[in-house]
Amino acid sequence: MKNIKQNHDVRLARFGKPRLLILGCGDVGLRLLPLLKPYFRIFAVTSQPARCAELRAAGAVPLVADLDQPATLARLARLANIVVHLAPPQSAGEKDRRTRNLAAILPERTTLVYISTTGVYGDCGGALIDETRLLSPHNARAKRRVDAEQVLRHWARRRGGNLAILRVPGIYAPDRLPLERLQKATPALLAADDVYTNHIHADDLARIIVAAIFRASPLRIYHASDDSQLKMADYFDLVAQAFALPPPPRLPRAELAQQVSPMLLSFMSESRRLQNLRIKSELGVRLRYPDVQTALPVMAAGLATSQE
């Protein structure tokens, strides 16, 4: 990525910073801003006027618009030729109306990085899969993501867009760990019933997005995942150990299904392991936190220091 950034610096000196638009500038978006500010003038869309001051302080130009209200999106058309789409779909239905509204105003030849989910694969029975795996979404939440991917692929082919899709597993960070779940002793599955789960640190995800902006091939899909090969309950055990909490009780699936929400049970019903060679070989990503085992002691130490 060094040579690409050097060439980009030369263009900046001649023409000024190009514009970049972020939709859904939450936690990951805020982590992106310091990585992108040296290269772009950044516009961040929010539907909440109260967030404008926060986004401005973080280095973005805030824009109030709502992906659920197409009339508010007209000002975004042709504003920037690089777009990072972090906004989730609406919470109901099998179509992602928000992404459909966005695609309707995207100009030709836009570079777009879309943050999707690995839930599009459904249950893979614990198999190790790459990005060519056939999609088999098992719930409306995942079907909305498949719809968004299809809509954006159609837009990219029709309008000459440079689309990269990042399929993202569970995102973790110091403030995105299952500590409350552990404190409440929410049960996990017995080893015989447990599922493989996949992870990415929020900081590494932000760095993968930057790499995709500069390096992704058109219409390419990437697994934005680390190297962890963990079952879900083992992940909870590692978090509990790092933060000196009791490990969760383990129950057989039939018994656990009576104690957790349907949404939580859906996450505990899909098992897959992700191959992540593309982000390394094609995007040149070197993970700061290659696996959960590496990251947790660092985060626990950081929390202990902040509390002193």
Image (tube, grey):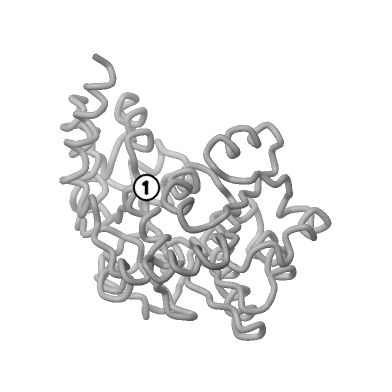
Residue 35: give x, y in percent of width and height: 41, 51
297 vs 271: above or below: above
Given the image, on which type of amino acid does mark 1 rest? Ala
Q: Nearer the viewer, residue 116 or 246?
A: 116
Q: Quadrant of the C terminus?
A: top left
Observer able to see residue 88: no
Quadrant occupied by the N terminus: bottom left
Q: Quadrant of residue 172?
A: top left
Residue found 48% across the figure and 43% down from its top: 30
Where does residue 155 sit, x and y in percent of width and height? 64, 78
Measured from the top left, where is residue 239 in percent x and y?
Answer: 23, 36
How many numbered marks have been drawn onto this rendered protein structure? 1
Please, is residue 238 above or below residue 226 in the view? Answer: above
Reply above or below: 67 against 120.
above
Residue marked by disc 1 = 202
Q: Residue at x 57, y 66 (%)?
A: 15
